[in-house]
Amino acid sequence: MLQLQAIRNRKDEIIEALEKRNIDAAPLVQNVLELDEKRRATQTQLDSTLAEGNKLAKEIGMLFKNGKAQEANALKEKTTTLKEDSKRLGDDLNNTADELQSLLYQIPNVPHQSVPAGHTDEDNEEVFSEGEIPKLNDGALPHWELAKKYDIIDFELGVKITGAGFPVYKGKAARLQRALISYFLDKNAEAGYTEIQVPHLVNEASGFGTGQLPDKEGQMYHVGEDNLYLIPTAEVPVTNLFRDEILAEKDFPICYTAYTPCFRREAGSYGAHVRGLNRLHQFDKVEIVRVEHPENSYKALDGMVEHVKTILRELKLPYRILRLCGGDLGFTAALTYDFEVFSTAQDRWLEISSVSNFETYQANRLKLRYKDENGKSQLAHTLNGSSLALPRVLAGILENYQTEDGIQIPEVLVPYCGFDKIG
RNA sequence: GGAGAAAUGGCAGAGUGGUCGAAUGCGGCAGUCUUGAAAACUGUUGAGGGUCACACCUCCGGGGGUUCGAAUCCCUCUUUCUCCGCCA
């Protein structure tokens, strides 16, 4: 959520930047500013009413103490209207504040200046690419065919026990997936990220903290009985670790990595592009999360991008990096780089990582602050990225490493797998 | 799941109707002393709103209530601890 202060001070700048998201924020912003004005006016009225009441209460106390009960009782009558007023003003204030809050929830993050304008993923800007696209033999298969051929991923079994989008990994695919998780965690730890294990269900406050609620309510699995949400990404529990925290400057940088399953309802996405492992309701992911000093957050973002690069380089997968355009940028992000691996067999790019800087947008909701050198509280910056998402990496490996007599295992993974070939 | 106890500042912990945003200790920060550090001593040290700055207002787990006045009394929810039951 944007800071009110920022909206007040840099209104036009913010409206202009939001145009990159193809939205006209002007009416919303105007509305916010008016409500803010109203909120403050009501607050001031309420405060002085309360102040008067406090004063009277003290006087009454003194009078009773000095045995002047009659005078005290006379004063008591004066408090009646004050109480009525403050009740009314208090309700007013709450209503205005709620309304203001819900408007603020509707304004997405302000895109970073480097974010290109654009409407769809077509308009994303390729900023880097690396790796050789392998030449596969004529009979090269997409991963869902390979999965069947070698009997390593069973989509039907998943349908039987749960439903579509919940595959069952068998034998060497299960082992390969576990190997990838370990490998990713090891690489992240090597790069200075502390490994943690977090709950896979979160409460409502956490959903609001990182911005999944209220706008993506329908995308998360919700356990109504206990009012808990299955996490769509480790970003949610890990970032919320810092909700309501005030850090010291010396605490930066904070770097965490966590492996978790991710649950997404993916309501409304069907069709050829969601075949096989391309889009699932449950998948595994290793995430990196950072909390940074505002001055360092973009350097940190670059660092995260470099880090993911080294992993893909080691896996020898051909990939490219896109800077997301305004239209494709997530609601809470200021700048996002997507990593995509090229799948030769599918002849398309598969998104395998998304690395973002949220600046203060999440921190404002989280009330995640630090003390600056003057001892004042300032909002920190939060960042996160996948390092990496499992199913599509798996798909990329299966497809790009297939040969006529089986699927090769990337060299760096062999020690983790204990075998070097599937098939 | 049953019975009981509890929730106060970064931490520990006092406070049971007014003088309490809250004693005290620890920790943090600044200073004195010291070549430097430690110790000792002195001062300072919660968050948010509001203001040019003050004033002022709110917050003692969350929500509601009683009262002129609530950290303190009542209701409710949540969480934690102890005992019992169940259990990987």
Image (cartoon, coloured by chain):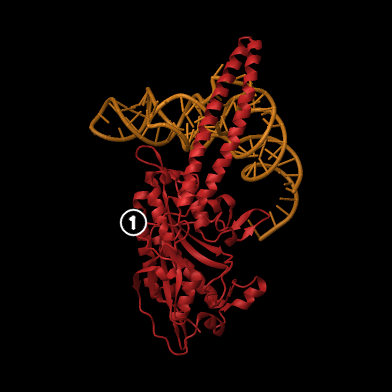
Chain colours: A red, B orange
Query: Disc 1 designates what residue?
Result: A299
Q: Quick check: can you spot residue A336? A: yes
Residue A72: x, y in percent? 63, 14
Horizontally, residue A81 falls left or right of residue A406, namely right
**Compared to A223, does B15 lie above or below?**
above
Image point (61%, 16%), residue name:
A60
Q: How many marks on residues?
A: 1
Residue A375: x, y in percent? 38, 37
A190, A386: nearer the viewer:
A386
Q: Secondary structure at mark 1?
A: helix
Q: Chain for mark 1?
A: A
Q: Quadrant of residue A300?
A: bottom left
The residue most toward the top is A67
Image point (64%, 71%), residue name:
A163
A128, A190: nearer the viewer:
A128
Horizontally, residue A265 falls left or right of residue A371, namely right
Q: Quadrant of residue B79?
A: top right
Horizontally, residue A361 falls left or right of residue A95, namely left
Residue A335: x, y in percent? 40, 59
The residue most toward the bottom is A138
Horizontally, residue B34 falls left or right of residue A268, namely left
B87, A102: nearer the viewer:
A102
Looking at the rendered structure, the kind of residue marked 1 is Lys
Residue A11: x, y in percent? 40, 48
Q: Quick check: can you spot residue A1? A: no
**Compared to B18, does A185 lie above or below?**
below
**Compared to A229, does A90 lie above or below?**
above
Image point (33%, 56%), residue name:
A299
